[in-house]
Image: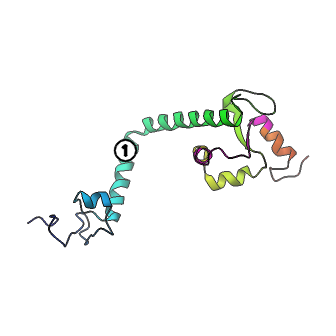
Amino acid sequence: MHINSKNNPNKICTVCKIPVNEQNTRPSEWKAHNYVCITCSQTRKNVESKVWRKKNGEHRRLYENAWRKNAKEEIIRHYSAGTLACKHCGFTDSRALSVDHINGNGTKHRKEIGNAAKFYRWLKVNDYPEGFQILCMNCNWIKRFENNEHGKQNG
């Protein structure tokens, strides 16, 4: 008799051999009669993910770079009212355009959210909230200096 048969009330994890039930097994695996506890399932998924990332690293890097570039352009287009230019000087090279927190505190906000990709996702998920503008890096640094947003005294 197969230990994990459909009629066996004493189902056990096929990996670590602990008893499993619907509470300590992923629903999809429970329904498929693939009785693996959540811990073993997550471990397996982590290993599979690491193998996939190693095997497909270049593909993943290219995909993420393309996503970031498209997201940045979409966000710049939104916050620049379609001009794709710095609000202060009109500079248009997207490589040097950035999202500026109008009221400062950008460093604190970025530390809470994470890297640029996470920040772009945050803006999109939050339906492009107010309080942001597009500045070139020069205007952004000048603004930071003039408003003492860099944490040092001017001059």
Q: Is residue 34 magenta?
A: no
Q: Kindly identify which residue carries mark 1.
A: 52
Q: Position of residue 50 (x, y in %)?
A: 39, 49
Q: Position of residue 100 (x, y in %)?
A: 73, 42
Residue farthest to the left? 1
Q: Is residue 138 magenta?
A: yes
Figure quadrant of residue 41: bottom left
x 88%, y 52%: residue: 153
Q: Is residue 81 left or right of residue 116?
A: right
Residue farthest to the right? 155
x 62%, y 53%: residue: 113
Dot 1 falls on a residue whose secondary structure is: helix
Front-lying residue, 79 or 44: 79
Q: Position of residue 24 (x, y in %)?
A: 33, 68
Q: Is residue 91 left or right of residue 19?
A: right
Please state the extent of the stretch shown in magenta in the rendering.
Answer: 121-139
Q: Is residue 65 left or right of residue 89?
A: left
In this picture, is 141 found above or below 12?
above
Local packing at callout 1 (Cα closer than 10 Å; few below 14, some 14-19, many 20+) is few
Front-lying residue, 144 or 28: 28
**Dividing the image into 4 quarters, which one contains the N terminus?**
bottom left
x 71%, y 46%: residue: 130
In this picture, is 118 found above or below 24?
above
Front-lying residue, 135 or 133: 133
- Chosen colour scheme: rainbow
Which amino acid type is shown beneath numbered disc 1?
A: Trp
Number of marks in picture: 1
Q: Is residue 144 left or right of residue 77?
A: right
Q: Position of residue 48 (x, y in %)?
A: 34, 50
